[in-house]
Amino acid sequence: MSRRLIAGASSRRQFLRLGSSLLALPWLESLAGAAAASGPPRRLVAICNNFGFYAPSFFPVDPGENYRPSEYLEILDDLRSKFTVFSGISHPDIGGDHASEACFLTSAKRPTSPGFRNSVSLDFLAAQHVAGATRFPMMSLSTGDGGGGGGLTYTSTGASVPPLYSPNAAFVKMFVSGTPKQVEAEVHRLRRGRSVLDKMEGRFGDLSQKLSTRDRQQLADYTEAVRELEKQVQLDEEWAVRPKPVIDATPPTDSGDRSDTVGRSKLMLNIIKLALQTDSTRVISLAIRGQDSRPPIDGVTEGHHGISHHGNDPKKIEQLKLIEKAELQALKGFLTDLATTREGDGSLLDNTQVLVGSNLGDASWHGTHNLPILLAGGGWKHGRHVAGDPKNNTPLGKLFVSMLQRFGMETDAFGSGSGTIDGLV
Amino acid sequence: MGGLKIRFPLASVFGLAYFAVVPPAAAGVPGDVVKVVETRCAGCHGGDEPEAGVKLDGTWADDRLVSTEGDTWFRALREIESGRMPPEDEEQPSASERALVSKWIRGDLATLQKQHQLSVGRAQVRRLSRTEYADTVFDLFGFRPPVSVDLPEDGRVDGYQKVAKALPLSAASIDGIMRMTDKIVDHLLRPPRKGSGDVKRYESLPSEQSAGHSLDLKDGTHVFFNSTLSGMGGFRFRAGRPGMYRLRISAYGYQTDRPLPFGIYAGHISAYPQLVELRGVLDAPPGKPSVLETDVYLSDRTLNELAPVADGIRLVPLGLGEPVPKNHLASQFGKDKPGLALQWIEAEPLNSPSVGDQWLTADFPPALCAEIGQPKPVAHLRSVKPEEFLAIMKKTVHRMMPRLYRRDPSTQEINAVMALVKADIDAGRRARDIVLDMVRGLLSAPDFFCIIEEPGPLTDFAIASRLSYFLWNSTPDEQLLEVARKRRLSDPLVLREQTDRMLADPKAKRFYKNFAAQWLRLDAIDDTTPDRRLFPEYHAPENDLLKWSSVAETEAFLKRLVDEDASVTELVDSQRVLANSVLARHYGLPALEGSELREGKLPASSPFGGLWTQPAVMKVTANGTNTSPVKRGVFVAERLLGVHIPPPPPNIEPLSIDISAATTLKEKLSLHAGNGSCAACHAKFDGYGYALESFDPAGMFREFYRTTTAETVTWKGPANGSWGASVGAVSTDWTGGNVPGPLDQVAIVGAESGTIVYDKPLYAEAALHDRPRNAAAALDGIVIGNLTPGSVTQFESAADFQFSRGFRPQYRQAVVGPGGRWLHCDGLVEIGGNLLVGGGELTLQGGTFRVLGDTRIGVDAQPAVLAASGEGRVEFQQSFRLGEAAVVRIVLTEKTHEPLIRVRGGGGGNGSIELGGRLEVEFPRGAKIGGRTFTVFKRLPGGKPITGKFSSQSDSIATVDYAEDSVKITLVADPKPASPANPASTVENASLTSVPRLDMAGLIAVQNRPKGWNKHRSTWRNHLPVESNGSLPDGREFAGIAELRERLAANPDQLAYGLGSHLVTYATGARPHGVDTVALEAIAKQAKPHAHGVRSLIHAVIQSDLFRNK
């Protein structure tokens, strides 16, 4: 472990930031209960590539088990038996443009309409189910930075959870222990926080007596947030004094190059692997955010955003493919890592459902139909192309229901989808 | 107030009396209105699937009439009153029927909705947005908290971040607020570090990358030639305390006679790539060191949003491109180019002691200040007695709470705070901790970080708060609070006075910035980049300031409208612009220098004018890297005219605009939106969008869409090779902008002579090539075919035929046959092999002509001319031979400092000139022509250096003619060496046969994007013409942007309504709907007597009930 991280100024800063992104949630199951649960833990990872994948290169043509891999799936063909590819699937009534990012894991309708209120995201819901079992109930990650664009996670009141942008900070939170003095200071901060929150909750309560009926919904949401944080602070206090897992890995160095989306994705995917391996958390989402600037990939001369609006210009599509292939290569590396890490009788991948997709089906025109969706791992029978109707899409929420059930939750609806998806067993 | 008072005589602002006097509204829709609606409207707008989703139902009771469903009546109002509804082909209601419905909506229904609003409020309680929180803390404490690090991103409703729905609070946001609170408190009462308040001077440093990036002058000045962050030198300066700093910069523009703009970047300057932000732009005066002064905000490590480091400074010249390559000597590449010369900077911290500390300790006696300010705080309170301290704290809390809560706190609230303070004192805590915990408690109260308003007419304090978050994006100052405390804001005159005072304050710039960011979405300026190949102008190095300037322009334009109370019509129609060097170029104005915005006047014929065609607005309304008439049309309808356009049904596939396809945009759009309900709605805005298609994604005016897609069209001449007829056709087609479809690749085959005239810029590449049979594989640009004897290829002007700068078409060989003419005007042409002017004429009026192989001019005593004039230049890498009858004529102008002819040793060999004909050099008398101009002659065998005076060589005869205004030097070959043994003549004899011939008689092809593309090269071609005509929602047609501008400007009421509705949303946190639209008409009407002045409109908004009631 590098000395800089333990003793250095930045590590303290990162340590103190603990909690805001690795959100802790209500303690629904006791630790003992979780440990007693039989079999290896179930896990869920959701990844959204916000500029999508160029559809003609992504989707295979023929359905079923004997599909011929598309240009992109050729890259993942070694893992063919480990994933299912879906087509003709999307959240209904999304519309909008890049705002649809906010709905990828929530399925809330019409994000650009004035009265829009988001709903709970797949990862947040799953995290609530297993809260308390691990140090971090979930992780929300993003390859972007604070300047623009958040993560994929939304709370039950539809508020966004700020993602963690720094792989280094995530590493530090998971594996680098503070000095006793730092731990003490953190515990003190958390205790002080509890009394502040008490007062805040009281004040919101007073206000809802005084203000109008229209304000009450908003105040109820605000109060709910305070309560959530109170529980989190309590949990944080308990975890703050417990030792962190010791691993044989060096902390990653963050990439300062915001245009290097693929490089940043690789760092984050590695963090995800470490988090799952050490059972630091069981639910992770990752927003892979393309940027407007030119990514450092040979042969790419324009900004990624510009290229994604290719307007069917073959030269742009050519460059777009270079970027997206690099992204898929990174995902391949990640899935292969999970598939080759043994756990119980199987692999880490067998116990981890990995959803890979995008909120855009056609980035060039902001189309939100026919989303590119892959599901890997999680013990499903894979190796198929589950082909939906491109004109009349299957609600993606159905797949989420299947995933949540596999995750151990009793539910038969998610957002705009009800019932499980056909073709996945 | 007038309009509203008349309409709602009882909806005045005098407190709760309101409720007592409002008459009870009629229950439900009155019977006579129901009757009209059922006979005239319900046919279409009734039932389960009403037309356009608009349902008018007479059975609704009051509770539904006040819900959002009830708003439908107000949407209908406009249609009914304007006569647009019922549609023409339906039976029309009588005037009295119309009046009946309209009277009810404007009367009882309006009252009902108004009453409902007063009981529940239009706006909802909300937290401060990120920027509001940061600005508030800055105004109170003098430094900015890292909101973008600690708070989740704000949402948007209709673009606005000041609306409750956009500002949800999650556990994470509260956690963030608590963290920021800790950080703020950590920065209070900090013992000053020794010398931290001093002004220090920091000398300029050379580039931290490899030496040679900067030109290091002897006096310690460093000159930077590249407009790029990497390779820049810096200063050892790092910000100490966070806050404003006064920078004094000693700098100047080097090797330039114009002011040189440079950017002040701050942030993590030692990261690679650097994590920095542009905090300001200044102009370095040319020539002489000058000291410039400016104030910038700088952060320390813990509050920095860019990276956890203290801000450093980088000063970067703008608009220069990157003339100095990496690892090369700046002294060599920058030798005659402008650069930014940096000497030193001084940084004076202005927030020391901090605004926050001064505020906090205003009531503290010096001894207490000293005690608290100890580097290691003393363990117990010492300097004052506990009772005294309690009294001091009470005074402090009394003073601070009103500013933090933006109202006077209740005794109970003060007591609660003081109880904690007392408990702390009793517990013997340190004075400093007690003070800081008091502040921490106040900052974490919802009363600080939320906007809380009680239903009904607002209290004076709540009005003060609205006013200051509207105009300052921040908390009220002491003066405003004092006015509110005296309950004087209910007085319209006082409110107006305060509004004017606040608009005059420098903090009002936050209004222009944030309102432009949300109303126009200017904050999306960085989201897209126009395509490099389609819009190379946008990416030209000299335009790097365009984006920054364009945002500054729009904000400054808004400010000017407010300052001058100028008419809202200037949003769409104004000849005045604010421009600097780049914007002047963008608008086609006479050249301006420097970055500062100055007022200019557009020519009457300009397509630009008004805010709506400003480059920043055009850029953010572009759709990715293309434009969409739909998106811009909706922008005009919603943002300028205040017409709400419902979002399209979500399951409609978006329009895929492939402009390389042959169908026009209009055809596509009508296919897309041509049917029923789509068409009805699209008619409300598509027209505006078509007019704005006249501007590309970078905001440049255009008449054609550009494309980069190559296509080939071939004209084949008659087999026997005369191309007269074909060329005639080509000539006709290519002039007048009437490009025959795709112009990327055009081949003219089978002709021998002709003239091709281009009158449109044609960016092209050129290559003469020797494999015409395999055209598809080999055509690589413009092929100037075999200019066989008798053929003429003439490119007439720079504008007509442009070889882009920095681009190197490789002519394998070029031949100008007898009688052939080739006029070259601009750019660089590089001939890879031989150039043979075999009896024709090659004229250069500009640009550079570089020949890598042999050059022969004149064959077989045929007259051959190589003429260069103006700034045209010829460079010969190898040998240069003149035939007997050849003439090389060079006309120098005063501007010419470079040699017009230069012979270099290429490929290891030495260049040489062998003269067979005449070399004429002509230049104006008195022109400053140094030795370098004549370097060519130094290479002459036996030639002597010529400096100032021409001297001949042994085998040539020179004459020097002094004309009245020019000097002409003629160099004629000595007849003696021109023997058959002379290579100059022997080679020429064999020349024509040794050049591979093209099989086709004439071949011209232009294709974009050959190999070896470089980024400054242009490859677009004009494609389909822009169709900027359209029709207004009422069906009136207009011919283009100018006519639409006239039509829109003719309706200032509508523009005032539009801007008013957005000001209301921004100012009150609630978007107007239902009865508010009636109130908005009244607001617009109030601005009317003031020529619809924008400032008057702001006053009308602030004086309105929409603003003064919750």
Image (spheres, coloured by chain):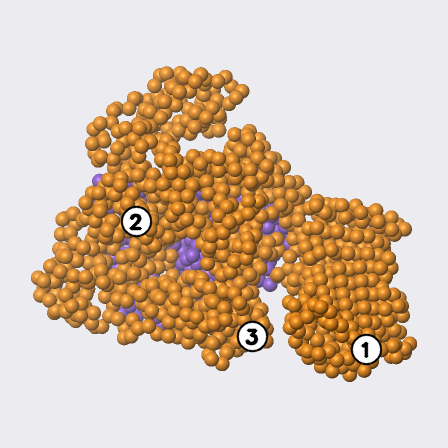
Chain colours: A purple, B orange
Question: Residue B89 at x, y = what percent?
Answer: 54, 20
Q: Does the image show residue A357?
A: no
Kind of residue indicated by mark 3: Ala
Q: Is A73 above or below relative to B644? A: below
State how far apart marks 1 and 3 are (Cα): 42 Å
- For disc 1, the neighbor class at 10 Å (few under 14, some 14 to 19, many from 20) is some
Question: Which element type, helix, strand or loop, lies under badge 1?
Answer: strand
State how far apart marks 1 and 2 are (Cα): 82 Å
Q: Is B215 above or below relative to A124? A: below
Question: Residue B823 at x, y = what percent?
Answer: 75, 60
Task: From the image, tell me which residue sits under label 1.
Answer: B957
Q: Nearer the viewer, mark 1 or mark 3?
A: 1
Labels 1 and 3 in the same subunit: yes
Task: From the image, tell me which residue sits under label 2.
Answer: B501
Q: Residue furthest front?
A: B964
Does the residue at mark 2 contact the one at mark 3 (Cβ under 8 Å)?
no
- Subunit of label 3: B
Kind of residue indicated by mark 1: Ile
- For disc 3, the neighbor class at 10 Å (few under 14, some 14 to 19, many from 20) is many
Kind of residue indicated by mark 2: Arg
Closer to the camera in the image, B756 or A293: B756
Task: From the image, tell me which residue sits under label 3.
Answer: B330
Quadrant in which residue B351 is drawn: bottom left
Question: Which element type, helix, strand or loop, lies under badge 3?
Answer: helix
Please give the name of the residue rendered at 67% of the width and 53% of the height, measured from the top-left corner.
B761
- Subunit of label 2: B
Quadrant in which residue B63 is drawn: top left
- Subunit of label 1: B
